[in-house]
Image (cartoon, rainbow, N blue to C red):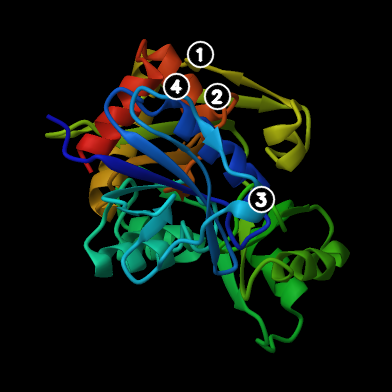
Amino acid sequence: MNRYNSIAVIYGCDSSEWEVSCRSGEFVASRIDGSKYNVYEIFARFGDWSLVAYRRQNSMRVIIPENERPQIDKTDFSVTLAGEKIKFDYAYIMQHGTPGENGLMQGYLEMLGVHKSSCSAFVSAISFDKFSCKSYLKDVDYVKCAEDIFIRSGDCVPDLAHRAVEKLGLPMFVKPTDGGSSFGVTKVKKEEDFDAALAAAFSEGETVIAEKAITGRELTCAVYSAGTSPVALPVIEIITGNEYFDYEAKYLGKSEEVCPAALSPEETALVQDASIRIYSRLGCSGCVRMDYILAEDGLYFLEINTVPGMTAASLVPKMVRTAGLDMTDFLSSIIENS
């Protein structure tokens, strides 16, 4: 018997990633088992939450005209549809960035006692901030972290560009600590380009991290909860002709994503084991994706994605297919085990 009846898939967000979020949310909603659940699609952006589509059990999807979309009642996470009050008993969060990835949406749902697909509010907040997350992993022996510098908007640091180059060398990456999809990220090759990179990063958030560039193979691996213990999916290697895995490479076909990655069994085990251990150390739940650089001197952790992209072309669905899993069954496992 299913634990839940009415699944709310929440997409759209307050960050630059909102369009990607919509595509991810629509994909997830379309793949949730319609024989088990009623599925309701909620578009949520800047406090305006409305029901945009729904699919009753064993029925076709109904799209609601824009001028007729009912508002979500945030006092109890419900909606009134054709005179019927529907209270959602589970939330599948597909908001990339704020508020769905930084703990705000999680905190709201936790206060109402609504079960959800993602990590807790605390874990989401820690994981979303690149500097904070790396701080949790700097002392472990199964993954390395590149040297970095933390900068907050308004900090007055004389000769910051020169100091950053002295500590981190060139090239380096400058990026917002709390962004995604490579918005605001710059690969800095010359000291005189540092200030412009800093400004680009601050356009996305109040805190920035400058990080030593690590040379190696870019890898990613997702972990999900399958009941008693976390399970690692196949590893993907990302090969791009761009300077790095930027927005164009991610979403406009400017990269090759090899799944499974052409690694030795030992290298594959290294990445999958590190991913499971990070998942457990941070206290994650749902499906989480970790990004790495495999360098000559070891495996370097880049960042964690607690609400990874879930479009048909996204990395996690590719891992699921390579693992020989059915996407609908995979989503049911997440729903029933989180």
Q: Position of residue 315 (x, y in %)?
A: 53, 28
Q: Which of 252 and 50 is in front in this view?
A: 50
**Disc nearer the start of the sequence (1/4):** 1
**Secondary element type, mark 1:** loop
Q: Name the residue under label 3.
A: 66
What is the CA distance from the residue labelled 1 to the residue labelled 2?
8 Å
Q: Position of residue 251 (x, y in %)?
A: 70, 34
In the orientation shown, which residue stands out farthest toward the right?
Answer: 192
**Disc nearer the start of the sequence (4/2):** 2
* Residue 262's disc number: 1
Q: Mark 4 points at which residue?
A: 319
Q: Residue at x 33, y 25 (%)?
A: 330
Identity, as a three-letter code, of the amino acid under mark 4: Met
Q: Is residue 304 above or below residue 270?
A: below
Q: Which of 29 and 155 is in front in this view?
A: 29
Q: Name the residue under label 2.
A: 237
**Disc nearer the start of the sequence (3/1):** 3
Identity, as a three-letter code, of the amino acid under mark 3: Glu
In the orientation shown, which residue stands out farthest toward the top?
Answer: 324
Q: Is mark 1 in CB contact (under 8 Å) with mark 2?
A: yes
Q: Is residue 59 above or below residue 322?
A: below
Q: Is residue 212 left or right of residue 70?
A: right
Q: Which residue is drawn at 66% across and 81% down?
A: 153
**Secondary element type, mark 4:** helix
What is the CA distance from the residue labelled 4 to the residue labelled 3?
35 Å
Quarter-wise, where is residue 57 in the image? Answer: top left
